[in-house]
Image: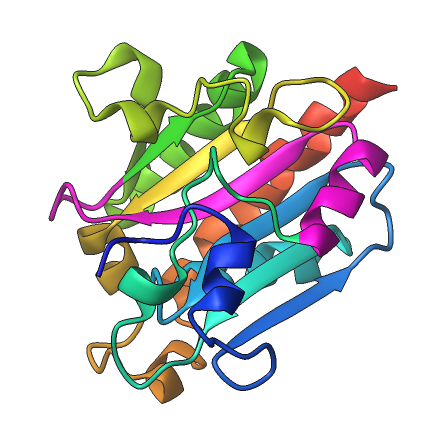
Amino acid sequence: MAEPRSYEEILARKCVLGRDFRVEFGDSNVDRCLLIAPHGGGIEPGTSEIMRAVAELGGWAWYEFAGFLRKGNKEALHLGSTDFNEPTLMNLLPQTPFVVAFHGANESSETIVFVGGKWDLGREVVVRSINVVFNEHKIHAADATKHDVAEHLRGLEDSNITNRGRLTKGVQLEFSRGARNALFPPDSSREARGRRSPLLRSVARSIHTAIEELCQHCR
């Protein structure tokens, strides 16, 4: 089955909101920034939990689209970032200066976070902040626009939801499979992902600190 190209196509495939997938959000402080996990739950496992850990630290506005099918979440529910048109998120984007998007990449078993998006300063600040954690925990970040990686990891398209806040530029975080495995207990079940490791708390804190710094540039 080919991945869907629109929210309407997901519904046409008889996927039911509240049963097969979930849409949730908290819009407090959306005028500062918006954190999103558009491929949460079983679509890109671990991304919802990472995003929520950061959101809770700063009371940041957040949005989650999460799949809960028993199998085939990616094939049935993965809307590409340039095709993503779920109405709740479309309503939130014009209300926020910039977006920080949390994704899961399968391209590397290395414990790396590829940082993309059109905001040059945003990428720089987030990479620097995460790499402070790397010195202690062996997880690191790299500017995706400066590496030979797949185009979707760079997140430079104007139509990418990462870049559709009022600044028309944002930050896209692609956590490799290795990085997500390091952030959660060895048991990769949904229950295990609910137990936050010290490393997850450290990485979340580093991203929160970077967001606080970036908000200073939006005043």
Residue 78 visible, this angle: yes
Which image quadrant for residue 209?
Answer: top right
Question: Residue at left 87%, top 37%?
Answer: 31
Q: Nearer the viewer, residue 81 or 181?
A: 81
Question: Residue at left 34%, top 65%?
Answer: 76
Q: Is residue 90 magenta?
A: yes
Question: Residue at left 28%, top 23%?
Answer: 151
Q: Which residues are magenta?
A: 87-112
Q: Is residue 103 magenta?
A: yes
- In the displayed structure, 100 sits above or below 58; it is above
Which image quadrant for residue 62?
Answer: bottom right
Question: How far across and down, in percent of the image, does residue 1 sit?
Answer: 21, 61
- In the displayed structure, 72 sits above or below 206; it is below
Residue 45 visible, this angle: no
Q: Left or right? Give the position of 219 relative to 69.
A: right
Q: Left or right? Give the position of 53 relative to 44.
A: right
- In the displayed structure, 46 sits above or below 30; it is below
Question: How far across and down, in percent of the image, does residue 5 sit?
Answer: 42, 46
Question: Residue at left 45%, top 50%?
Answer: 203
Q: Nearer the viewer, residue 57 or 60?
A: 60
Image quadrant in which the C terminus is located: top right
Tell me how the rendering is colored.
rainbow
Q: Nearer the viewer, residue 91 or 137?
A: 91
Question: How far across and down, in percent of the image, does residue 136 sit?
Answer: 31, 45
Q: Left or right? Give the position of 12 relative to 213.
A: left
